[in-house]
């Protein structure tokens, strides 16, 4: 089940820290119930390798979605849809390319469909659409290089998600879409006995966070790449 958060229930207006938009809760929200069904096939060529495929079906009752209200400031609120379904396929593979190089990847395709219900159908602009926040395609790949003799390892991660609805439009306003993007992260670790030095490079692609509404740019920003260094020491 998915229970509403306090801010989603709060019956007063506040400013959301993400985006700075006026937001008001909905005290009439109901919890969402989710039924999951999965079928999975796996093959292990070696103890460290796998090839797998899975088919899944998720049935949502009263899913909670973010909605955008047609006020002068495009106020955000929350509402229960009547139901939704996610049907999809996931493919996963892990391969030891060389004694020092390991690669892992997975891809997920999701066909999402939501049932609005009569009450929301009279308010929300789109009556046929995917579940808010659900991308049709999600892809991840990870490559790791290890030199155990020297206590050194490096991991490179790339993640991509397809376009998704981030706010559901109402009263004639189009849905707000978050455009798909990819991100690249790198982690390098050097061990000195019980001590460990870690270097982290996040968001190296520095892709645009682009949100559109009705084909027009609704908001656009970049977070920029980040770099961090950490040191740890184990006494055990």
Image (tube, rainbow, N blue to C red):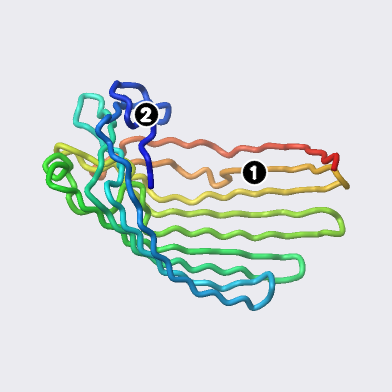
For the residue labelled by badge 2, is the local secondary structure a helix, a strand or a loop?
A: helix
Closer to the eye: label 2 or 1: 2
Q: Quadrant of the C terminus?
A: top right
Name the spot of residue 123 as percent of width and height, x first: 14, 39
Residue receiving disc 1 = 201
Please state which of residues 80 and 191 is positioned toward the viewer in this rendering: 80
Total number of numbered labels? 2
What residue is at 35 percent from the left and 35 percent from the top? 219
Mark 2 vs mark 1, CA separation in Å: 33 Å
Percent coordinates x, y for residue 122 in the rendering:
11, 42
The picture places residue 96, in percent across and down from the top left corner, at: 69, 70
Q: Residue at x 44, y 62 (%)?
A: 108
Q: On the picture, is 211 further left or further right than 195?
A: left
Q: Secondary structure at mark 1?
A: strand
Place residue 70 in its image quadrant. top left
Above or below — where is 177 with respect to 77? below
The answer to whether 33 appears left or right of 41 in the picture is left
Compare residues 97 and 121 and report the one nearer the observer.
121
Q: Earlier in the sequence, mark 2 or mark 1?
A: 2
Q: Residues within 10 Å of mark 1 (few under 14, many from 20)?
A: some
Q: Depth check: give the residue in front, 57 or 144.
A: 57
Residue occupied by mark 2: 7
Disc number at residue 23? none
The residue depicted at 50 percent of the width and 75 percent of the height is: 41
Res 37 quadrant in image: bottom left
- What residue do we see at 21% from left, 42% from top? 174
102 vs 193: above or below: below
Residue 28 x, y percent position in the rendering: 24, 33
């Amino acid at each position: 089940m998915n229970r509403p958060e306090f801010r989603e229930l709060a019956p007063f207006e506040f400013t959301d820290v993400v985006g700075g938009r006026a937001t008001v809760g909905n005290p009439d929200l109901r919890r969402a119930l989710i039924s999951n069904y999965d079928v999975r096939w796996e093959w292990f060529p070696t103890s460290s390798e796998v090839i797998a495929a899975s088919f899944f079906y998720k049935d949502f009752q009263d899913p909670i979605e973010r909605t955008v209200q047609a006020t002068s400031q495009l106020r955000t609120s929350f509402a229960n849809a009547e139901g939704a379904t996610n049907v999809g396929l996931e493919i996963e593979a892990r391969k030891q390319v060389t004694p020092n190089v390991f690669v892992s990847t997975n891809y997920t395709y999701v066909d999402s469909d939501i049932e609005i219900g009569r009450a929301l159908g009279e308010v929300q602009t789109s009556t046929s659409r995917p579940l808010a926040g659900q991308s049709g395609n999600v892809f991840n790949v990870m490559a790791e290089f290890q030199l155990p003799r020297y206590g050194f390892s490096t991991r490179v991660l790339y993640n991509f998600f397809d376009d998704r609805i981030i706010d559901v439009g109402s009263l004639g306003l189009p849905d707000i879409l978050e455009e798909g993007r990819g991100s690249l992260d790198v982690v390098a670790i050097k061990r000195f006995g019980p001590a460990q030095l870690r270097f982290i490079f996040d968001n190296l692609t520095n892709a645009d966070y682009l949100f559109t509404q009705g084909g027009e740019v609704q908001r656009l920003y970049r977070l920029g790449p980040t770099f961090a260094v950490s040191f740890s020491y184990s006494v055990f």
